[in-house]
Amino acid sequence: MKDIKNIFRNLEKKLRQSSWFEDDWEIYNRGVYLQLYRSNWHNHNQGGIHFETYIEAPQIKQKAFPVSMHAEEDCPSQSEFIQKFLEIEGDRIKSWKGYEKVGNSYGICQRTLPLNFKNLEQRLFEEFNRLRQLEAGVEQALRVL
């Protein structure tokens, strides 16, 4: 079993070194749980808008883990935000292989990946790079609320 915390540490380092990662991007890394978000996304307590993944005991047992986007309870006008955001970015999300809209109160989209440690860090990096393309849509939806 590989050290997942080390994979997440390396992922954080890789994200921070990305050409698009600027001062207003933030990462919350709890070892086997990571969120990526912009500073104005109301996520100071990890309950706003963010991209997220985690590999904890249930995911190891299932040999699969999620990569998702959430707009949780700290997101202002949460349901209106989600509706507006999906109007803006829904088609793009649908075009991404394996991504589906999540129908719960805070989930926006999710992809479940098989837990295979081969190139895991790189695969996670690619998923977060894909999700961060939604940045402009998040900003646009926040502006109209």
Image (cartoon, rainbow, N blue to C red):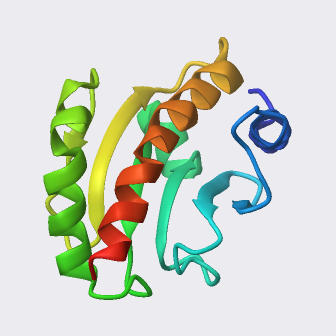
Q: Position of residue 122 (x, y in %)?
A: 67, 20
In terms of image quadrants, where is residue 102? bottom left
In terms of image quadrants, where is residue 55? top right
Q: Is residue 102 visible?
A: no
Q: Position of residue 68 (x, y in %)?
A: 40, 49
Q: How many marks?
A: 0
Q: Residue at x 52, y 53 (%)?
A: 52
Residue 44 shown left or right of residue 134 in the figure = right
When the figure is inspected, residue 48 is found, relative to residue 96, above or below; the finding is: below
Image quadrant where one finds the C terminus? bottom left
Q: Is residue 95 visible?
A: yes
Residue nearest the viewer, comparing 41 with 70: 41
Q: Residue at x 35, y 53 (%)?
A: 137
When the figure is inspected, residue 22 is found, relative to residue 74, above or below; the finding is: above
Residue nearest the viewer, comparing 40 with 131: 40
Q: Residue at x 64, y 22 (%)?
A: 120
Q: Position of residue 116 (x, y in %)?
A: 56, 19
Residue 74 shown left or right of residue 120 in the figure = left
Q: Position of residue 62 (x, y in %)?
A: 41, 36
Residue nearest the viewer, comparing 88 with 60: 88
Residue 5 shown left or right of residue 36 in the figure = right
- Residue sitting at the far top: 118
When the figure is inspected, residue 116 is found, relative to residue 37, above or below; the finding is: above
Residue 40 shown left or right of residue 86 in the figure = right
Q: Residue at x 27, y 76 (%)?
A: 144
Image quadrant where one finds the N terminus? top right
In terms of image quadrants, where is residue 107? bottom left
Residue nearest the viewer, comparing 36 with 32: 36
